[in-house]
Amino acid sequence: MMFLAKLFNKNDPRDNGGNGKTDRGILVFENTSEVILAERILKGAGWKVKVMGPPPEIRTGCDLVIEIPLIERLHVLRILAENNVSPLQIVPVTGPLLKPVDLFHTKRIGHYLMIRAANMKITVDLDSGTIVNISGGGCPDVPFLAKELVGLPLDKAPAPRDIGHTLCGYALQLAYEELNRRCSE
């Protein structure tokens, strides 16, 4: 498939660079654990998927969905089925009301930069590069994550996914990755 894409000078369909038309779809899962597993499987297969918040019209109790190139849905479903993962539904993004919600919110206050992903926030002092706050969630590992990360330089802090075990830890990992990306620009 990649050979043909190169031959006809088209982008690799695994690249998540949609043009805003009905070429995007979202995978809806029963629970967050399935979203995290599906994301790992698809990224492992080379897909550049994006985890986002579901539009209000299709919330199922799970606070996350995966955006995919809609034209590749059968290929994506096959990869997931080979790993015993199956979404509840695939919804085409056909209008602004069905557009998934970006998980990231950024706020700069003086020399501090805060990134929020879903319900978790991480704040860094831009002058020193030190993590000064972890907050949000309601999961039992949030105090532990804060204890382990606050006071450490961002580039020396352990990845939240390596020490957290809940949805809050996963959301904090997303915020941590976005904060690293922004601080390295």
Image: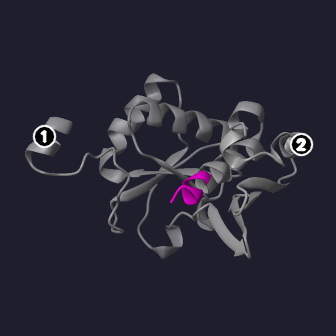
To which quarter of the image does residue 22 belong?
bottom left
Q: Is residue 80 visible?
A: yes
Secondary structure character of the magenta stretch overall: helix
Residue 4 image label: 1
Q: Which residue is mark 2?
A: 147
Could you tell me which secondary element the residue under label 2 belongs to?
A: helix
Q: As shown in the figure, which amino acid type bears the numbered disc 1?
A: Leu
In the rendered view, would you say 83 is above or below 129?
Answer: above
C-beta proximity under 8 Å, tags 1 and 2: no
Quarter holding residue 136: bottom right
Residues drawn in magenta: 180-185
Residue beneath the point at 59% across and 55% down = 178
> Which of disc 2 and disc 1 is earlier in sequence?
1
Q: Tag 2: residue type?
A: Lys
- Where residue 152 sits: x, y (%)? 79, 45
Q: CA distance from mark 1 to mark 2?
A: 50 Å
Residue drawn 76% across the image and 53% down it: 130
Can residue 1 be seen? no
Image quarter of the N terminus = top left
Q: Which sits in the foreground, 115 or 53?
A: 115
The one nearer the camera, 27 or 52, is 52
